[in-house]
Image (cartoon, rainbow, N blue to C red):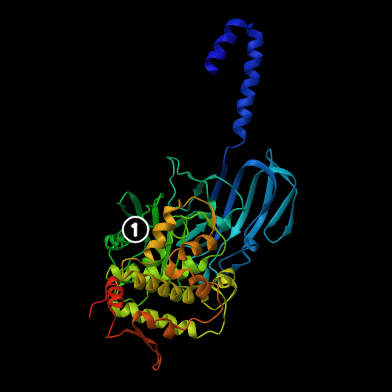
């Protein structure tokens, strides 16, 4: 169409008029190119743990808000230094309204600022950005202003460093994302990759350092879990799964820390951890973290339903470890006994929904411990009623059959699914929305289990005498006398 119009103009209009139109049209094109269609971000590395961020905005703005707290880490906005705004290449005045809150006197098209991201609390290593002389994790959710929108990002790396991400990039090393809050970048020296395809799903593992495990064995372990959870949910992940195995920074005593964000699993490992079997230990960690790629990361659900995507995930991960022979049936029961001991050790009585709302402001792990025990009881209830033919697995099938991209309030959607069976129609009232303590000793009686809390730790065991339905229940979980 444009070519046709240009040819017509050449034929009809005098040359001077056409020249003027061409000049105006050319100026219009140059002006349009000056404003990027997506926000452009450049990250360069300065001395120590400091980075410079330069942003060319897709649309002019005059106010910016940075995340100041995330997953228990606070004071994130205090890391921002020398915040500058520009318009047409000229500096414009900016006021700092509060920590992490800035406003300029007129709209800007470009920003620059410094960020100091040294190591902070060991508890925060898997949740917020940090940088050392050897490596670092950069998470755009706490590096960029909120509501940035789609963007492109490139890096000015120190000599010998590389960057890894789950994102695609072009020939110039520019990455693109429509969801910056999900983006994680692993930067450092001597990063290596192993990868494969699993049932049409791409998997990549980026590793730094020397370890007492074989890269290919770890890849195989992660691939088994991708396949397992794809079958559990009847849903294939749309984006490439990337797992970062990062050495725990020197001076941190924790054995490991992990988080799953977007399509990325972060695993920080202490090289001095005394694991007897490193590959098996990684497999157990993966059972929990890899399921998060589906729940909640592939769901478009809102609200605080952490009791489900943490507590229930712990129980499903335990079942996965059992099915894949990472643990035996005795350890399956022993784990539940230890969780019950932990649950009984604190006095806080909250509904699972209330516990989810204040997950990051309390020291008691109600979401995890109570959530896992409730998932256990739900699974046993369904298996007993169906003679072992149905289980908690069905909830995940139905959850993903409803179209994962469909918006919904998490608690409403999950509780409705859990109550779909006549055997569990009152389950939410009794366990999820109730402040009463879970009395596991009484709750497991119908299932043929015994709870013995007389010793130092609670022991969970299957009775010798079982009804036919109880036998079917435990056979469906892999129990054999």
Closest to the observer, 166 or 185:
166
Q: Where is residue 199 in the image (x, y as percent from the top left)?
A: 30, 51
User: Where's the C terminus, which quadrant?
Assistant: bottom left
In percent of width and height, residue 359 lies at 56, 71
Q: Quadrant of residue 19?
A: top right
Q: Mark 1: few, some, or many residues within 10 Å (few <14, many ≥20)?
A: many
Question: Which of these two is toward me, 45 or 246?
Answer: 246
Number of marks in the rendered image: 1
Asked whether the viewer can see residue 220, the reply is: yes
List the single residue furthest toward the left: 481
Q: Residue 289 or 233: which is nearer the viewer?
A: 233
Above or below, 161 relative to 435: above
Q: Residue furthest bottom?
A: 454
Q: What element carries label 1?
A: helix
Residue 254 location in percent, x, y? 45, 75
Residue at image coords 33%, 61%: 225
Name the image quarter holding residue 87. Answer: top right
What residue do we see at 31% from left, 77% from top? 470
Q: Whole-percent x and y of residue 385? A: 36, 71
Q: In this view, does 235 lie to the left or right of 68?
A: left
Front residue of 464 and 221: 464
Q: Which residue is drawn at 39% across and 93% down?
A: 455
Q: Is residue 85 left or right of residue 466?
A: right
> Left or right: where does residue 111 sit relative to residue 398?
right
Q: Name the residue under label 1.
A: 226
Most distant residue in the right direction: 105
Whether residue 328 is visible here, answered yes or no, is no
């Amino acid at each position: 169409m444009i070519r046709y119009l240009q040819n017509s103009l050449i034929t009809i209009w005098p040359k001077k008029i056409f020249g003027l139109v061409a000049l105006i049209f050319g100026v219009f094109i140059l002006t349009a190119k000056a404003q990027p269609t997506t926000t452009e971000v450049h990250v360069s590395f300065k001395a120590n743990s400091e980075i410079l961020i330069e942003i060319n905005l897709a649309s002019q703005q005059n106010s910016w808000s940075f995340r100041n707290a995330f997953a228990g880490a606070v004071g994130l906005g205090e890391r921002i230094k020398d915040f500058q705004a520009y318009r047409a290449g000229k500096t414009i005045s900016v006021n700092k309204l509060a920590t992490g809150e800035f406003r300029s006197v007129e709209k800007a098209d470009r920003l620059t600022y410094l960020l100091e991201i040294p190591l902070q609390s060991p508890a925060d290593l898997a949740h917020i950005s940090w940088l050392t002389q050897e490596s670092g994790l950069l998470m755009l959710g706490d590096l960029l202003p909120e509501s940035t929108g789609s963007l492109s990002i490139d890096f000015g790396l120190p000599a010998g460093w590389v960057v890894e991400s789950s994102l695609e990039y072009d020939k110039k090393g520019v990455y693109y994302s429509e969801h910056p809050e999900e983006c994680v970048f692993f930067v450092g020296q001597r990063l290596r990759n192993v990868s494969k395809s699993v049932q049409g799903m791409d998997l990549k593992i980026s590793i730094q350092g020397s370890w007492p495990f074989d890269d290919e064995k770890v890849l195989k372990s992660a691939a088994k879990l991708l396949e397992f959870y794809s079958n559990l949910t009847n849903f294939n992940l749309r984006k490439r799964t990337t797992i970062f195995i990062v050495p725990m920074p020197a001076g941190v005593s924790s054995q490991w820390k992990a988080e799953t964000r977007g399509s990325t699993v972060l695993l920080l490992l202490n090289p001095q951890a005394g694991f007897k079997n490193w590959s098996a230990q990684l497999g157990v960690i993966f059972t929990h973290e890899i399921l998060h790629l589906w729940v909640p990361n592939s769901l478009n659900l809102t609200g605080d339903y952490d009791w489900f995507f943490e507590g229930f995930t712990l129980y499903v991960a335990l079942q996965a470890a059992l099915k894949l022979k990472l643990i035996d049936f005795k350890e399956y029961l022993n784990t539940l006994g230890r969780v019950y001991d932990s649950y009984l050790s604190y006095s806080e009585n909250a509904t699972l929904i209330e516990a989810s709302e204040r997950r990051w402001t309390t020291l008691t792990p109600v979401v995890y411990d109570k959530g896992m025990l409730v998932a256990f009881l739900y699974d046993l209830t369904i298996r007993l009623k169906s003679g072992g033919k149905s289980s908690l697995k069905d909830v995940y099938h139905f959850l993903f059959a409803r179209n994962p991209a469909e918006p919904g309030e998490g608690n409403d959607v999950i509780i409705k699914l859990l109550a779909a069976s006549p055997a569990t129609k009152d389950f939410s009232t009794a366990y999820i929305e109730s402040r009463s303590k879970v009395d596991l000793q009484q709750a497991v009686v119908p299932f043929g289990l015994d709870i013995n809390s007389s010793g130092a730790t609670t022991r969970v065991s299957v009775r010798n005498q079982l009804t036919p339905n109880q036998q079917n229940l435990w056979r469906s979980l892999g129990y054999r006398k």
